[in-house]
Structures are given as structure tokens and as C-alpha cells.
Image: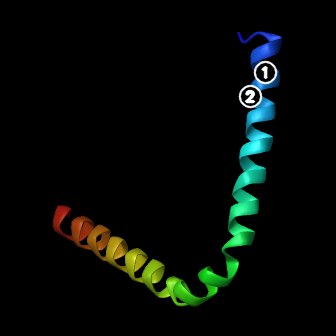
């Protein structure tokens, strides 16, 4: 489906892209620790809201 050159380019692109992401994250890790310290609370809140909506929808559907 893909030529050999396209496969090589895709693999090289993915490797370089992941490398840049890791480099950028490591560069900003001190800021992440300051600004995103309590991020798990927001994630938990989102999960609770979605679960509540799903429970209400199932309850009202039956």
C-alpha cells in the first residue's frame, strides 16, 4: 500500500516527533510541577460528571 520511502519517512517522523515531545517536556518539567500540581482533581471531577450523566441517562431511559 505504501512505498518503501513513505514507510521510512513515517518511521523517521514518528521517532523525531516523539524525541521532540520528550525534550520539550523535560525542558518544562519545573513549570509543570508548579502549575499542574493538582491536575488529578480536575480529571477526577470530569470522570464523576460523565459518570453522573451516564447514570441519569440510563435511569431516565428505563
The disc label shown at residue 7, or none: 1
Indicate the position of residue 7 as horizontal and vertical percent values.
78, 21
Work out whether residue 23 or residue 14 is closer to the camera in this orientation and state it: 23
Indicate the position of residue 17 as horizontal and vertical percent values.
71, 45
Q: Which residue is mark 2?
A: 10
In the rendered image of this protein, does residue 11 appear above or below residue 45?
A: above
The residue most toward the left is: 60
Residue at 30% in and 77% down: 52
The quarter of the displayed image where residue 1 is located: top right
Spatial CA span between label 2 and label 1: 5 Å
In the rendered image of this protein, does residue 57 appear above or below residue 34?
A: above
User: Neighbour class for label 1 at 10 Å: few (<14), some, many (≥20)?
Assistant: few
* Total tally of numbered discs in the picture: 2
User: Neighbour class for label 2 at 10 Å: few (<14), some, many (≥20)?
Assistant: few
Residue at 19% in and 61% down: 61
Residue at 31% in and 67% down: 54
Quarter of the rendering occupied by the C terminus: bottom left
Give the structural element (helix, strand or loop) at label 1: helix
In the rendered image of this protein, does residue 4 appear above or below residue 13?
A: above
In the rendered image of this protein, does residue 58 appear above or below residue 14?
A: below
Q: Are marks 2 and 1 in contact (CB under 8 Å)?
A: yes
Residue at 82% in and 23% down: 8
The disc label shown at residue 55, or none: none
Give the structural element (helix, strand or loop) at label 2: helix
Amino acid at each position: 500500500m505504501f512505498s518503501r520511502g513513505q514507510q521510512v519517512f513515517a518511521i523517521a517522523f514518528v521517532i523525531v516527533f516523539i524525541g521532540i515531545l520528550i525534550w520539550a517536556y523535560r525542558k518544562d518539567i519545573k513549570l509543570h510541577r508548579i502549575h499542574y500540581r493538582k491536575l488529578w482533581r480536575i480529571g477526577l471531577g470530569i470522570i464523576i460528571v460523565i459518570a453522573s450523566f451516564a447514570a441519569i441517562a440510563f435511569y431516565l431511559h428505563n
